Image (tube, rainbow, N blue to C red):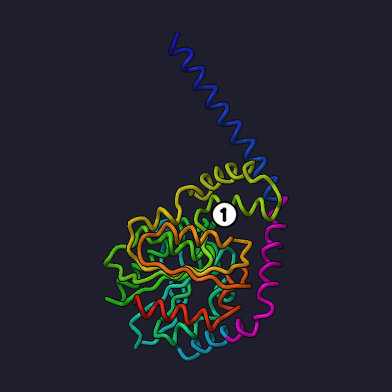
């Protein structure tokens, strides 16, 4: 009798899970179609509005990168990720440099917007640069962006590539927004023989799950709790990742890598409290610098002189 009722309960549970998946799938399709366009428009409009006053700086950075391409000081590099995705990076080099800075752009952004403007200055500090296209972006393949979860493992693939190619080159990891979270999460995989000397993180979020929850509420004025678990189920089914599987705090636990946290005080996409939480919970060498009047990922453009002074000091002390 017990086995009979046990079998009935198992069947009921299976049916309930099946119904849940069907219902969440229908809701997922509805929400995707209803808000995908709005989401992209909100992000596109916010980015364009924010960068408009600084287009001269961005264009100057792009011209410098193009000049390096013309002189043969760049290389297009493709490697494979841990899960078989083709990853692309633009390598800008001077053979005399023995240090490499690996830079990652943000969610649905590009190296042009996020990284080009500061490249010349980092290069002049003595760093070769790798500007990576995050998975499912630009020349990198893949169908799904994973909010830094699998991107953090991609960062390690790049570190391994350069450690094999250039013995004993010092590596610095840097990123903006999702790229900032990616390089911080990558810390969990870093070992002493990888030669990673420091991490620069501009506008990171602590936990992908919380960031998605925040954006649903902040931008669309919806109760994110109604959607977040549904979104996570389909992330697991389609993207093979969970929004809950990694956080920056856990990734940095028991690590001894100097980190520099930078955040704009007017950031309403990834609130500055994220960097404060990371700073408070990291127990090794760290620095936190905020920039007044800077929105998300805009600290360099708002005050490039101070930004570069902070970074140059941090790197000179740690690399």
Dot 1 crowding, Cα within 10 Å, few <14, some 14–19, many 20+: some
In the picture of the structure, the residue carrying the numbered disc 1 is 211
**Main secondary-structure element of the magenta-colored stretch:** helix
Q: In which quarter of the image is the C terminus?
A: bottom left
Q: Position of residue 107 (x, y in %)?
A: 57, 63
Q: What stretch is highlighted in magenta?
A: 34-60
Nearest the camera: 209 or 138?
A: 209
Relative image position of residue 179 (x, y in whole percent): 50, 65
Residue drawn at point x = 50 percent, y = 56 percent? 206
Q: Does the magenta stretch include residue 294?
A: no
The residue located at (45%, 78%) in the rendering is: 311
In this rendering, the answer to whether 52 lies above or below 145 is below
Going 45% across and 82% down the picture, which residue do you hit? 122
Vertical relation: 212 (above or below) 14? below
Q: In this view, does 156 lie above or below 236?
A: below
- Nearer to the camera, 300 or 190: 300
Q: Is residue 141 visible?
A: no
Q: Is mark 1 on a helix, strand or loop?
A: helix
Which corner quadrant holds the N terminus? Answer: top left
The x and y percentages for residue 22 are 62, 35
The percent coordinates of residue 279 (x first, y second) are 45, 62
- On the picture, is 152 further left or further right than 115? left
Which residue is pictured at 52% across the width and 22% down the height? 11
């Amino acid at each position: 009798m017990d086995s009979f009722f046990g079998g009935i309960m198992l069947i009921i549970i299976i049916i309930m899970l099946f119904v849940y998946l069907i219902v969440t799938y229908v809701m997922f399709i509805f929400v995707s179609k209803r808000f995908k366009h709005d989401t992209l428009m909100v992000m596109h409009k916010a980015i364009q509005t924010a960068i408009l006053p600084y287009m001269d700086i961005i264009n100057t950075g792009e011209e410098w990168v193009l000049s390096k391409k013309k002189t043969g000081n760049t290389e297009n590099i493709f490697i494979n990720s841990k899960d078989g995705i083709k990853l692309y990076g633009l390598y800008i080099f001077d053979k005399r440099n023995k240090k490499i800075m690996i830079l990652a752009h943000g969610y649905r952004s590009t190296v042009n917007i996020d990284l080009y403007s500061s490249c010349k200055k980092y290069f002049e500090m003595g760093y070769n640069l790798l500007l990576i296209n995050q998975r499912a972006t630009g020349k990198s393949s893949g169908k799904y962006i994973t909010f830094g979860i699998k991107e953090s493992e991609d960062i390690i693939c790049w570190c391994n590539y350069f450690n094999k190619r250039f013995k004993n080159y010092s590596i610095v990891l840097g990123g903006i927004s999702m790229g900032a979270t990616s390089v911080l999460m990558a810390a969990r995989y870093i070992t002493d023989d990888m030669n990673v000397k420091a991490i620069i993180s501009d506008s990171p979020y602590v936990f992908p799950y919380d960031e998605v929850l925040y954006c649903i509420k902040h931008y669309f004025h919806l109760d994110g709790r109604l959607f977040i678990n549904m979104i996570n189920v389909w992330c697991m089914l389609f993207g093979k990742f969970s929004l809950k599987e990694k956080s920056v705090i856990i990734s940095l636990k028991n690590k001894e890598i100097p980190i520099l946290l930078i955040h704009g005080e007017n950031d309403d996409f990834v609130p500055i409290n994220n960097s404060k939480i990371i700073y408070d919970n990291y127990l090794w060498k760290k620095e936190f610098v905020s920039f007044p009047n800077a929105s998300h990922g805009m600290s360099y453009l708002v005050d490039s002189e101070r930004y570069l002074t902070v970074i140059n000091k941090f790197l000179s002390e740690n690399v």
